[in-house]
Amino acid sequence: MNALVALCHFCELHGPRTLFCTEALHPPSPSPSSQAGAPVPGDRDRDGDREGEILSQTQCVGCRSLPASHPGFVSIDDETGIRFLSHQHPRQSQLFSVVRQACVRSLSCEVCPGREGPIFFGDEQHGFVFSHTFFIKDSLARGFQRWYSIVMVAMDRIYLINSWPFLLRHLRLTIQSLQSTALKVFDNEQGVCPQRAVRMNSGFSPAVFPHQRSGNAARSLTSLTQHQNLWASLHSSFSWLLKACGSRLTEKLLEGAPTEDTLVLIERQTEQEEEMSCWEGAEGGTSKSQRPPSESELGHDFLSDDAKLDELPGPKFRSLRHLRQVLGATEFRQLVWHVLMGNQVIWRGADPGLIQSAFTVLKSLLPVGCVRSVPYSAQYEEAYKCNFLGLSPDVPIPTHVGSSEFSVLVDVSSERSCQISVLCEDDISSLYQFTISSANTQPTDRGPTLLNKLEVALSNENLSVDVVSHCLLCLKEEWMNKVKVLFKFSKVDGRGREDTQKVLALLGATGPGEEDNVRLLKFWMTGLSKTYKSHLMTAVRGGERSPSQ
């Protein structure tokens, strides 16, 4: 991430000053135009050194961190080759003026109500700044506290705004650590010599006031916290912050408009970050372990469980074709039919890894927005909470669920009680027995059309697993486009049944398996992103207003 983190201080004698600065230096890219004697990244700019030396001549103890002779701190990321360099001032003269301006603005005019908290400001010319101001206790300071700020400066406004929850969460940890350490020193000093009583009893005169406080007007942050390795610790914190903030969001080249799955994933990630910030910022709120899981956290399994799947021991389903070979063609079609119709799919067994692997391959059949998964639970969860539910073998199924045609149960039982060996891990059919049961009486051999095409691809052994995956992706995009047309026509425009039937015929959803196709389209409507729905509604309302205007 092309950004810079700095710790700033409002000195009572010299005003806003930069105390400590950490910047990321990317390795140079080899090019034929590089000449001998070119500056190497990491070498300090002479102009920047000259400006730093001028400021250092007017510095006091309170606005100085490292002496000019100190080489600074350097950390190297072995993976990327990026060097994180920390010193009192930036190495380049251009950055020196940018950080200087950000420092002055963060400790003067750009402050939030209460003068303590986060704020965002900046422009295209001087960069954009995320600033968090805070106070540090000092028994000898005016008002018994000193004013500091931590600023992150970057030229990418969108990236910095999107990183707001992340930066706020981790900068608060650093600030709270500094404040708690300084508070202990403050309490000890007040216990030895209470300054409030000394100031109240001493005579005040404007002529002698500067001389009375001249010896105590400036104190270093190291003195306030009694932390001898303070700057090395801040270097580690700031370096990690730059690395983590740069790696949490990555740019991805999209050929055309983003898919609905991409939009839904972005919306879910945003909701989770907002919920986390709200819970952490609420005073007296319950902890995450005490509060019940939200719907977005239940849906978060789509993002996290797949990454943890490889860590689980035991046999696993590798693909849809593998699942079809184990269950058999008839049982596989029945199970996939329930998945595509939006019915609740329940797997009950003693092997969580096997059940999660089955959900992983089955979830690939649906848009991301249609997936609500509880991978493994000790109690039954209702269908409105999840359409993929894993249960331990001793969990009973409620009567209304067992008799419902909108659910399917897969019981997994062990064929033998011997321990699973490494040699037969992939031979799932010899280790487990699968029993599929459902109260549904509707035939599943007619449709939907997507399932018929998918079975043709799966039964063709000449097609590899990767080819079948790309085939499924194309089928999903094809039917997701049909869902968008039907949503616009029926939900947004409010057309009648006769007109809707004509649209279904144009979409190729009529004929054999028409009922299944319509059910699939209606279920997949629930997976449309909020961004797409709001865009459609805004466009329609704008079109309705334009004639009257």
Image: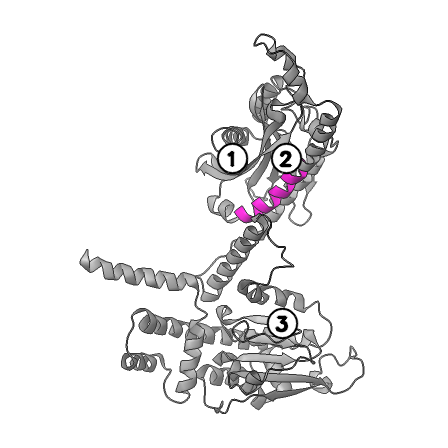
The question of residue 122 being in magenta is answered with: no
* Residue in the picture at 67% in, 79% down: 395
* Residue in the picture at 28% in, 78% down: 496
The question of residue 174 being in magenta is answered with: yes
- The three-letter code of the residue at mark 1 reads Gly
Q: In this rendered view, identify the residue nearer to me: 420 or 460.
A: 420
Per the rendered image, the range of residues in magenta is 164-178
- C-alpha separation, residue under disc 2 versus residue under disc 3: 49 Å
Neighbourhood count class around disc 1 (C-alpha, 10 Å): few under 14, some 14–19, many 20 upward: few
Residue 540 at x, y percent in the picture: 29, 63
Residue 413 seen in this snapshot: yes
* Residue in the picture at 63% in, 55% down: 287
Q: Earlier in the sequence, mark 1 or mark 2?
A: 2
Neighbourhood count class around disc 3 (C-alpha, 10 Å): few under 14, some 14–19, many 20 upward: many
Secondary structure, mark 2, is loop
Where does label 3 land, which residue? 375
Q: Earlier in the sequence, mark 2 or mark 3?
A: 2
Q: Quadrant of the N terminus?
A: top right
Asked if disc 3 and disc 1 are in contact, CB closer than 8 Å, the reply is: no
Residue 257 seen in this snapshot: no
Where does label 2 land, which residue? 42
Q: In this rendered view, identify the residue nearer to me: 14 or 332.
A: 14
Which residue lies most toward the top here? 207
Q: How many marks?
A: 3
Closer to viewer: mark 3 or mark 1: 1
Q: Earlier in the sequence, mark 3 or mark 1?
A: 1
Instruction: Indicate which disc residue 114 carries.
Output: 1
Q: In this rendered view, identify the residue nearer to me: 33 or 360.
A: 360
